[in-house]
Amino acid sequence: MSSVAITEATAARFDELAASDLAPVEVAVIDSGIDATHPDLAGRVVSQWTVEDEEGRLAVHPLETGINNDTFGHGTAVAGIIARIAPNARIHDIRVLDARNKGDPTASLVAFRHVLAQRLRLINMSLAIPASQREPLFKLCESAYQRNQVVVAAKRNVPVTDEGLPAEFSSVISIDNHQVEPMSLHFIEQGLIEFATLGNDLTVPAPGGGYTVKTGTSFATPTVTAMCCLFLGRWPMLRQFELKTILKARAHGHV
């Protein structure tokens, strides 16, 4: 069945997939939070959480669902892209970043462990975790791969000591931002980052109900997360390496 699904998914049109009868897919967005009151996201965000200090240790706390949990505007934009492309996405909001779009790097690991425990199928990470957390992060990504939980992660916009973690790991689907046609893909032949799609000048939801324009790898990444959500909604048994095979086969050019 997998080979048939791969062949069908490679040829499928995204608009036709989105209009078809798809199974719901649980999608975690580890970010700055989501404004679930935005019209584009109303009813699409099914749980909301925050990572906060609890007597000297970081812990995940549940929030009332349907609130504005976004402290910066980044997560709402990311979630809005996923919701627009993939109508079958059930979005789970886990806030790890503050009003300056910064956060304790270990907060992202705490959020990641929570997402693994919840068995959420897709995990969007439009952020880069510092190299100091490489080892524990690598283990978490390996655990996600073994559980068939799919991580889609952004390359750093400006590489420093690394090109972005967890994007560098082979156990995730890694995304760069290139100036290409909407909903098209490039496969990157050299380096650790695998795929690129459009992340430039995208009109996205902003907290409070309006819209803004964003550019960066952070906003290319949820496009690929949404593509994977459509594929998994139609062919739920696809594994991560099969999704990579489909994405590569759909790439219109190599860079």
Image (spheres, grey):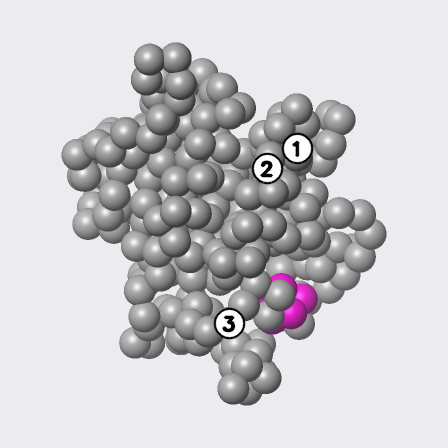
Quarter-of-image position of residue 232: bottom left
Kind of residue indicated by mark 3: Leu
The residue carrying mark 1 is 134
Which span is picked out in magenta? 243-248
Between the C-alphas of marks 3 and 2, the distance is 24 Å
Mark number for residue 238?
A: 3
Residue 45 highlighted magenta (yes or no): no
- Residue 211 appearing in the image: no
Kind of residue indicated by mark 1: Arg
Q: Kindly report the secondary structure that dominates the magenta region of the rendered protein.
A: helix
10 Å crowding of disc 1: few (<14), some (14-19), many (20+): some
Does dot 2 land on a helix, a strand or a loop? helix
Q: Residue at x 46, y 39 (%)?
A: 112
Does dot 1 land on a helix, a strand or a loop? helix
The residue carrying mark 2 is 137
Ranked by sequence position, the earlier of labels 1 and 3 is 1
Could you say where residue 102 lies in the image, as x and y percent from the top left?
A: 49, 19
Mark number for residue 249?
A: none
Cβ–Cβ below 8 Å for labels 3 and 2?
Answer: no
Q: Residue at x 75, y 55 (%)?
A: 188
Ranked by sequence position, the earlier of labels 3 and 2 is 2
Quarter-of-image position of residue 56: top left
Of marks 1 and 3, the one in the foreground: 1
Compared with 3, 155 (above or below) is above
Q: Which residue occupies the foreground of this view, 143 or 87?
A: 143
Cβ–Cβ below 8 Å for labels 1 and 2?
Answer: yes
Q: Is residue 149 left or right of residue 82?
A: right
Cβ–Cβ below 8 Å for labels 1 and 3?
Answer: no
Kind of residue indicated by mark 2: Leu
Q: Residue at x 36, y 26 (%)?
A: 59
- Residue 61 appearing in the image: yes
